[in-house]
Image: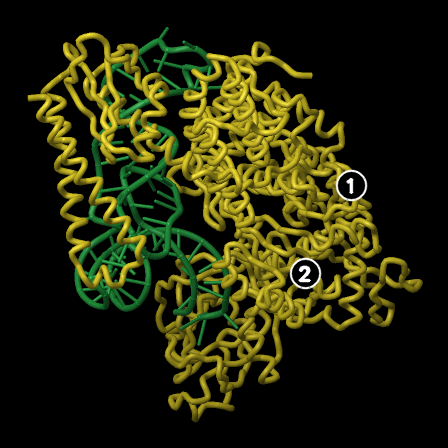
Amino acid sequence: MTTNAQELPAQYPPAEVEARRYEQWVQNGYFRADADSDKPAYTIVIPPPNVTGVLHVGHALDHTIQDALIRRRRMQGYEALWLPGMDHAGIATQNVVERRLATDGVSRHDLGRDAFLEKVWEWKKESGGSILGQMRRLGDSVDWSRERFTMDAGLSRAVQTIFKRLFDDGLIYRANRIINWCPRCLTALSDIEVEHSDSDGELVYIRYSDEIVVATTRAETMLGDTAVAVNPNDERYAHLVDTEVELPLTGRRIPIVADEHVDPEFGTGCVKVTPAHDPNDFEIGQRHDLPSITVMDERAVITTHGPFQGLDRYEARPAVVAALRAEGRIVREIRPYNHSVGHCSRCKTTVEPRLSLQWFVNTTPLAKAAGDAVRDGRVKIEPVELEKRYFAWVDNMHDWCISRQLWWGHRIPVFYGPDGEVVCVGPDETAPEGYTQDADVLDTWFSSALWPFSTLGWPEKTPDLEKFYPTSVLVTGYDILFFWVARMMMFGLYAMDGVAPFKTVALHGMVRDQFGKKMSKSFGNVVDPLDWIDRYGADATRFTLARGANPGTDVAVSEEWAAASRNFCNKLWNATRFALANGATVTGPLPRDRSAVDSWILSRLAEVTAEVDRYFEAYEFAKVCDALFHFAWDDVCDWYLELAKPVLFAGGPEAEKTQRVLGEVLDTLHRLLHPVVPFVTEELWTTLTGAETIVTAAWPTARPELINPTAEASVATLQEVVTEIRRFRADQGLKPSQKVGGRLVAAEDTARSAAFLSHEPLIRNLARLEDAAEGFEASATLSLAGGITVEIDTRGTIDVAAERARLAKDQAVAEKEVAQCRGKLGNAEFLGKAPDQVVDKIKARLAAAEAELVRIAAALGKLA
RNA sequence: GGGCGCGUAGCUCAGUGGGAGAGCAUCCGCCUUACAAGCGGAGGGUCGGGGGUUCGAAACCCUCCGCGCCCACCA
């Protein structure tokens, strides 16, 4: 079903093409991967977006990269699986639903656990589909038949299985520890769910005794002090160690202990020790066997000490200071103090360290394995510079607090007996009669960490798992290297007997605005990818993002660049329209006796094909795009098509050859571009070739035998001459339509001269030079290197003054160049050390510059 | 406090030892029959400053200045 050019409109209509083509792709099952295939597997699991989220421009970048990788591999003959899905995003989703309920004045506690969860599932149903629809708009070639959700039955089974295994291996334990606690979300948080930022506070110096003054930013916690600590080597306080002081406001007597943790240089060198409300103090308490006194509840409200009871931490702080003051000279001084404070990454509430009973993963052996897999090269991180960050993280990992006091998530599979028995229950087991399940759920990253294999059916030994694990590459932003990547490494290596979940981690950056600024709603610089898709098309949106995607670095985008990408798609559209209208053919062998021009474009095509492959392998998407953009626009459209026109229009056997070459070039170019701009290439390529789809077409292989330096040099000469004449014409203010007489003269008998003369008709055509007619007299002479000149008769049109000025400028440049080259060549040591090619290059430059001077002198003579 | 990175044209970025580049923006001229979402031409940079290594430095070393990011239990 070939289409002729008349059926294609003059401008590419993305909206119409995209909707139609995506439906066809899905209906024809092109994206479906087959576990029984003999082809080698290539697997990417999508970083599962938050179920409550919408597609933002960061997803668009992430998905464009993954889709490009997957589409290329599919074309290369791999069994390519791109597995889609979503994350239940425990705390984030629960917060969203709670906020919605709050507008009706309802709390989750009013509903109760089961009814609340029903609401969350309803919300998931309502909102979860939208991001999937948005992925279709982008053109994501995911296998929809394998869509997964972290709360699916199968994935929940995987969660329970690995929990049980870790529990039985002693790598999961329950302990009373100081953890990060959000007093608003009322749950424990892991270290990475806490964001630190500097904030202004006060450092209050409190006199506990004549000799002991402590400094604190959280005065209210003194109510729970159970010791004062000093450094064991601090002579100022040595005599006080093991004595006691009276804790103000309480009348309690507390010991003075010596502990290495205390920095004698900071503050007074004395530290108040509150084991129940500070992680360091907790450690000190452990070492010195101190009691822990909890003085705040889960909402950070004081629970003890009459006058303070019922005050929240921020009310209690000044109240305690005031009370100390009331007791006279107990507060020595208060200084402003800027220090770092942790906030809940979800709601920004200041985190309160809190002693509580939680579940932890002992990460020591897991993190070691996760580090080693990268260290010994089993897993590569691209770009390699980001490895350092990865190591810094896995080599210093603390145990991971995995229990959350939430309702939305995977319930901890541990049951407690009437007498405090603890039983961890595996997926096919049931708890003993009368046991009750732990009320908490798991950190959302616990299930995300299983994603690369839970989605493939683990713990069952499924054909999918067999075929598609380990995955080939993980594509994600560097911002979740710690959150997600390190955890997938730990659990993947653990669950899959030491086989890492992916071979390569390809990290990209964040999408920023055209000035490199972070996108934010308040700043008003947020790009909505769907808006761009509506106005410029999915391909243009994808191309804009991919074109800025240098490994591991942020991507700046702007509306103007999206428009430029749209223009590029349109350029492809029109080039192909031209080819179709002029009989381009795509079958049969390439013609043997080719013109230099045809050989040149095939040579360039071979080079670009090799380049694109190289860049793809290195995850250099910006360079993939750049190479193809320049080849398509400059080489093919600006030169090849223009050079091909006279040949095609003349007809005959030469035209047939060029039709074949033109077809070959566009056929290959579309296939090279398809991973990045799938829709426009599908539409054009199927029209050009009559084939059903480009999605499963063969990826072009580089053909080094087509590389032809002679043809490239020949066309380079042609381009140089044409450009020189055009520049001259522009300087003279000659209109493109105005033809002038010209004569091509070659003084030397060289390959360059031969090329020059052989291209005479093409040169005349592109530069609008007429044959030298009767009475021709050269009024200007353009001299190029190698003794080739173009004489032009511009009498009546030439602007002598303008031409003089231009020549004077050229002369200055050439003289500078000559001086530079002579200086270099005159340096004996340089000649002795430098490689021959360098010397040759400089000699060639010198010769060219000297020829330029000769040309200028001749031209000036002509003008005079 | 520790670590990593960046500073090249108006903007965003390539280039990491041998002729300063690209895209977008700007200026000039063109409806030349695939495309005005186009064509042709042009201008524009002491490669953050200073010092060093080298025949030669945007690149390598030192230093200063400016910016960004990540990690962090000095109260």
Color of chain A here?
yellow
Q: Quadrant of the C terminus of chain A?
A: top left
Q: Where is residue A267 shown, x and y percent of the image? A: 38, 75
Residue at the far front in the pictured view: A749
On what subunit does the disc labeled 2 rest?
A
Q: Nearer the viewer, residue B58 or A183?
A: B58
Q: Earlier in the sequence, mark 2 or mark 1?
A: 1
> What is the x, y in percent for residue A147?
74, 40
**Secondary element type, mark 1:** helix
Q: For mark 1, what is the residue?
A: A118
Residue A654: image location, x then y, percent = 50, 19
Q: Residue at x 53, y 79 (%)?
A: A251
Type of residue at label 1? Glu
Quarter location, residue A103: top right
Location of the N terminus of chain A (image quadrant): top right
Label 1 Cα neighbours within 10 Å, binned few <14 / some 14-19 / many ≥20 = few
Residue closest to the eye, A830 or A350:
A830
At label 2, which amino acid type do we have? Ala
Q: Identify the residue at horizontal 77%, vertical 68% (top origin).
A: A167
Q: Secondary structure at mark 2?
A: loop
Which residue is identified by label 2?
A500
A214 or A63, which lies in front?
A: A63
Answer left or right for A13 relative to A464.
left
Asked which quadrant contains residue A199, the reply is bottom left
Q: How is the image coloured?
A: by chain
